[in-house]
Amino acid sequence: MKYEDQCRLSAGVCIKINDASQPIGLRLPLFNYSGRELIGVSRSEELVHNEINRIKTLPNSRCRGWTKTLHDNCDELYESDPTSKLKGIGEKMAEMLRQFDLFTVKDMAQLHNDIIQTMSMTAKRLTSNKLTQWQQQATRATAGTRPLPKRIDYRTSANPYLARYGEEEWEKRIWRCRRLSKYVSVKELVRHIDKETAAAYKGTMYSETYRWFHDALSVLTDAKCVKWMKEEGFYDHWIKPELGCNDLVFAKNKKGVITSNARYAGRPVGNTPEGNPLDNSTFRDLRVSLGLHVAATWHLDNENPKKFSMATPSSIFSAVSRIWDPHTGMSPTSERIVQDTLNVLESSKKIVQHGGGIVPGLANRNGHRNNRCQDENVVTPKKKPLNKKTLTEMRIHPSIHEIIVKQAEDENERFNNSLLARSEKVVGLIGMGSEKDT
């Protein structure tokens, strides 16, 4: 990771057509991997392999949980069981019965009526009714000796985690172990993206042909990851260059010679705000909204659930997840998502017209890209004057509306009181000056 204390997450948006045939923008559930490093398939397979081998070589003194003893039905009674297994017989009563040579359930089953009568007269606690009930209970016992418990040693399996937790759970469990918990596999990210996209378009005409886009992370374009995605059926859902686009990229080298490069064949491009509605400009809307919420609740106690804070990665994710929530969140708006997503189509056309290069003014860029793309003919629009907006129009979360209103009222009251005090002071000074003149 570049910054261990960052809040790191993956977000997604999409467009659906509502019942009125109008496009609506949706925020998809977030993927949180704060405090963990995103790694590729090769690295993740290596870590999993090492962890499996570690479990398989654990000594007996440290294999807690990796061995298991399976007992047969404990409620079943066997002839070889001690008399204490019979209902109503504890250890003290079993000790008393041993004085009459009754050690096992089989001994109790072979008890005759005349012996029962003799025992009931000898010991006060041994009534004939109790002895008869135990004798009848013992006759229903299973013949023979109780089988020895079976012992399972998961360490002997090819994959101890699979043997212990099953097909659906073992991967989740292995990534929670101490040695792997600081990493997150790109497989988990891809599964999340595909799952949430499929859920968004479920029940529509695109339920089987849905597509999702992610820019060209090295862990995604890695050969092993591509192979895995093809095997799992994810690769066809990923939006990638078509019709030979990016198969050959021409550029000038440091010597000014134009050379071709095929390394980007079949791969999506990297940082392209004009081709990604999240980079242009829904993420900006989220950052602005987050800043407003943090400023509005800075005075609340840290324990207050309504507080929006950026103090720690977990508090940042808590704040962002409330603002981004697909159902109760406030930003980015449906209108902004639709606007920026549809702009991708227009941007694609202009990029084609410019031969696949960077188009000046097509999307906001910072740093060297911005400097390189300046065009004297591009006119920067003047900023519009700010209009007063309601809290809802400002996309402020409803849970803190009352807090902001109360804060504004208190601030107005402090301002008015301060203004009144200053006015009274000025009037007093003027009066003192008049008296001196007199």
Image (cartoon, grey):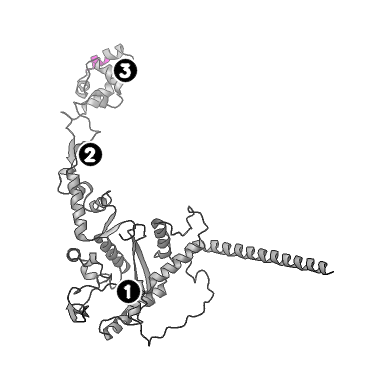
Instruction: Say whether disc 1 or disc 2 marks the residue closer to the N-terminus.
Output: 2
| Residue 84 coordinates in the image, percent (x, y) | 26, 24
Front position in the image: 68 or 138:
68
Q: Which residues are magenta?
A: 112-117
Task: Name the residue beneath numbered marker 3.
Answer: 127
Q: Amino acid at mark 3?
A: Thr
Residue 312 x, y percent position in the rendering: 41, 56
- Please say if the residues under marks 2 and 3 sit with CB atoms less than 8 Å apart: no
User: Is 76 part of what is drawn in magenta?
Assistant: no
**Mark 1 touches mark 3? (CB < 8 Å):** no
Disc 1 marks which residue?
276
Q: Is residue 113 shown in magenta?
A: yes
Task: Please report the residue visible at 30 percent of the width from the left and 14 percent of the height from the top.
Answer: 120
Residue annotated with mark 2: 62
Amino acid at circle 1: Asn
Q: Quadrant of the N terminus?
A: bottom left
Residue found at x 28% / y 63%: 195
Q: Nearer the viewer, mark 1 or mark 3?
A: 1
Mark earlier in primary sequence (2, 3): 2
What kind of element bears circle 3? loop
In the structure shown, which secondary structural element does the residue marked by tag 1 occupy? loop
